[in-house]
Image (cartoon, grey):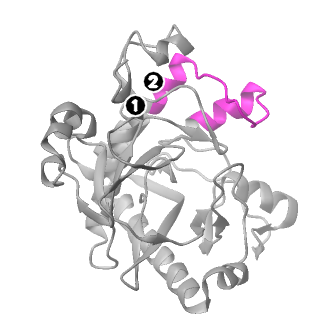
């Protein structure tokens, strides 16, 4: 294994964890000669000077807030490039943190590019260093996942009263803003809008809520034209030069539930075009949702990787770089 980057090859970490996995190459973890700011569940973040960050989206996958030991081929490139597509699409609504996504335009050291350029290509962005809001802005447009479970027990979703008799996966009368904490360890916790106000102030809380709802509605409208329903999602915002901007990722198969529009039928589970494939497997595996997470079987890896690629192609009508 190279000292600069942990690449999972056919003889690398991936196969040691599950010998049945295919030899397709993935990126599990990077080790660049730059100051490491954070190694998150999916992204490795490095400092570039004082005010810029290099964000690399790896092929790690987290489910129920636990990083699983099995990477998903092409996942990092899909997440990065789907986000770039939406950042561009939403440019008339809100600014984002991206400075450059072509590694040759990032102003990085030529020696670094020579050694790591092939790793960075397609899965990295150079961004402005913003101050992230301490909340995740979750929007739910359909009754699915934990929202469906909550509704069955209480008739509500995260405190929002809903009409009786709604079916599983049914579209809600209107999208709901259901924010949560951003846990670095353990599970995120749903919080009320009033708690968001206490954390960041009323004006910023209202701006984040209104922008989240607008971005979701615009995304849903466009995705329907490409045959995809976006059931729910989460956005993250940061403050840069006293302005709220969009950061992290946007409407990806990691942060959203994507369903095929053509086969949609409320009252039952929907076919998944996202990491719900993994969640469903884990729910049936008997795992107690605490670390360490179980390795994924080959068929789940293949289905998830294919779903990520397919949703990228269907949404963007672009080739994956």
How many C-alpha atoms fall within 10 Å of the one at disc 1: few (<14), some, or many (≥20)? some
Q: Quadrant of the C terminus?
A: top left
In the picture provided, is 57 more to the left or to the right than 160?
A: left
**For the residue labelled by badge 1, is the local secondary structure a helix, a strand or a loop?**
helix
Name which quarter of the figure residue 93 lies in.
Answer: bottom left
**For the residue labelled by badge 2, is the local secondary structure a helix, a strand or a loop?**
helix
Span highlighted in magenta in the image: 278-304
Residue displayed at 50% across by 76% down: 213
22 to 188, vertically: above or below: above
Check residue 302 in the rendering and tell me which mark sits there, or answer none. 2
Residue displayed at 47% across by 72% down: 131
- Frontmost residue, 111 versus 124: 111
Q: Can residue 310 be spotted in the picture? A: no
Name which quarter of the figure residue 32 lies in.
Answer: top left
Residue displayed at 40% across by 86% down: 242
Q: How far across and how far down the image is residue 71, in percent?
A: 48, 28
Q: How far across and how far down the image is residue 116, in percent?
A: 24, 34
Residue displayed at 18% across by 54% down: 106
Name which quarter of the figure residue 198 lies in.
Answer: bottom right
Query: Quick check: marks 2 and 1 in contact, CB under 8 Å?
Result: yes
Check residue 306 in the rendering and tell me which mark sits there, or answer none. 1
């Amino acid at each position: 294994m190279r000292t600069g980057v942990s690449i999972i090859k056919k003889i690398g970490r991936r196969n040691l964890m599950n010998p049945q996995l295919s030899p397709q190459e993935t990126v599990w973890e990077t080790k660049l000669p730059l100051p490491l700011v954070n190694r998150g569940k999916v992204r490795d973040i490095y400092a570039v000077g004082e005010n810029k960050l290099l964000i690399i989206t790896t092929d790690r996958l987290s489910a129920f807030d636990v990083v699983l030991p099995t990477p998903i081929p092409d996942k990092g490139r899909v997440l990065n490039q789907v986000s770039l597509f939406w950042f561009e699409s939403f440019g008339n609504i809100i600014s984002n943190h991206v400075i450059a996504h072509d590694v040759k335009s990032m102003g990085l050291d030529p020696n670094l590019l020579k050694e790591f350029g092939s790793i960075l290509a397609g899965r990295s962005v150079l961004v402005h260093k913003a101050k992230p809001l301490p909340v995740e802005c979750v929007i739910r447009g359909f009754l699915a996942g934990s929202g469906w479970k909550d509704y069955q027990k209480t008739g509500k979703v995260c405190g929002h009263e809903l009409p009786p008799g709604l079916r599983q996966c049914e579209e809600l009368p209107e999208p709901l803003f259901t924010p949560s904490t951003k846990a670095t360890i353990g599970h995120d916790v749903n919080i009320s809008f009033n708690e968001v106000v206490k954390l960041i102030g009323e004006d910023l809380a209202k701006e984040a809520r209104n922008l989240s709802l607008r971005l979701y509605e615009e995304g849903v409208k466009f995705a329907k034209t490409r045959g995809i329903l976006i059931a729910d999602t989460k956005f993250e915002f940061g403050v840069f030069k006293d302005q709220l901007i969009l950061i992290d990722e946007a409407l990806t198969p990691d942060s959203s539930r994507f369903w095929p529009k053509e086969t949609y039928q409320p009252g039952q589970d929907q076919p998944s075009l996202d990491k719900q494939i993994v969640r469903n497997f884990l729910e049936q595996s008997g795992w107690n949702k605490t670390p360490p997470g179980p390795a994924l079987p080959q068929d789940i890896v293949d289905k998830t990787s294919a779903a990520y690629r397919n949703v990228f192609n269907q949404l963007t009508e672009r080739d994956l770089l």
